[in-house]
Amino acid sequence: MNPISRRSLLASAAALTGGLALAACTGTPNIPRPTASPTGPVKAQLDEVLKIVSGGSDKFGVYVTDVRSGGTYSFNGDYASQNASMVKVMIALMALRKAGGLLNAENDAVATKMITQSDNASAETLWAYGGGPDAYQQLADELKMTHTHREQGRDDWSWTWTTPSDQVLLLKYVTEGGTKAFTTEQGAYVYDLMGKVIDDQTWGVGAPKSSAVAVHLKNGWVQFKSTDNLWAVNSMGTVKGESRDYRMAVMTRVADFATGRELTSEVGRQVFSILGSGKL
């Protein structure tokens, strides 16, 4: 793969702004949707809906853990692609590990901006502070995120690789602890920031968000101008409320940001609806 510069990443962010404006002007992208409500066991309902919503794409993956039952569901959950800004959860954990506890006031402000606003400059700062790609790989290895790795020959954070299943495993450690890689307090710190993401970035997993439904999430999006010109549009997080309690990640690779945002949000809405009918 050809190198991608920080300037290119910032250009992608500019493209995102244009994508949002375009979506507002031209309406919702045309995402395949079921014409009737699914029936049968919960996993069968999810299969039925996601086969339609994905449009048969092999560049699409979903993984869900139902906290109520401990049950799991995978729809191409080992689909591997670049993290984009979804990696900022791990960057925050890298910085906390480097600090040996919680962050000082200066880095706390940087981490807050990185997670809640998906600020790239803040991510650059903490990526360097936390140890860069080597520290990222070490953290992934310690967490046994077996499909999560740095891009060989590259030092940038956006092109690190992961899968939906690995992201849900990361969410488990952030919310429940159970790892020596970071403390429960450090995980809670990151999780709290994920609950404060600005409203216009709570699409995807966060599509069901309401006054009765709490969402903690981090989304990611980047265009690969140097390769296939497609967009990786991803979302990971937790949803709790209205009798639901689950962790989910969805990863896609699509023609434009607006399509990816609507596709991940449709997945978020469908999973929320189906898990209201029963547990995994």
Image (cartoon, rainbow, N blue to C red):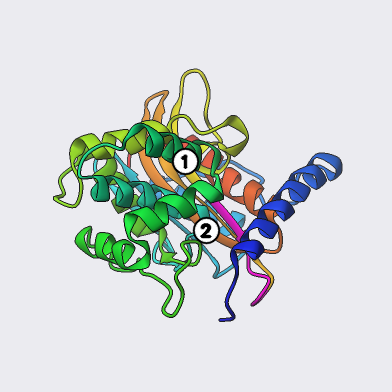
Q: Which residue is mark 2?
A: 84
Q: Where does the image place residue 174, in percent across and percent down from the top left?
A: 28, 42
- Residue 278 seen in the figure: no
137 left or right, relative to 88: left
Q: Is residue 227 magenta?
A: yes
Find numbered disc 1 in the image and state the secondary structure of the residue it sits on: helix
Q: CA distance from mark 1 to mark 2?
A: 13 Å
Residue range corresponding to the magenta coloring: 220-228
Quarter of the image where one finds residue 185: top left
Q: Identify the amino acid type marked 1.
A: Ile
Residue 93's label in the rendered image is none
Q: Which mark is residue 115?
A: 1
Quarter in which the C terminus is drawn:
top left
Q: Position of residue 269 (x, y in %)?
A: 55, 39
What type is the residue that disc 2 sits on?
Ala
The image shows residue 210, relative to residue 117, as above or below, that is: above
- The disc, 1 or 2, on the residue closer to the chain's N-terminal end is 2
Q: Residue at x 56, y 32 (%)?
A: 198
Residue 207: % across, % down = 56, 36
Q: Residues within 10 Å of mark 1 (few under 14, many from 20)?
A: many
Q: Secondary structure at mark 2?
A: helix
Tell me if label 1 and label 2 are in contact, CB under 8 Å.
Answer: no
- Other-residue count near label 2 (Cα within 10 Å), few / some / many at <14 / 14–19 / ≥20: many
| Residue at point 57%, 77% (across, down) | 3
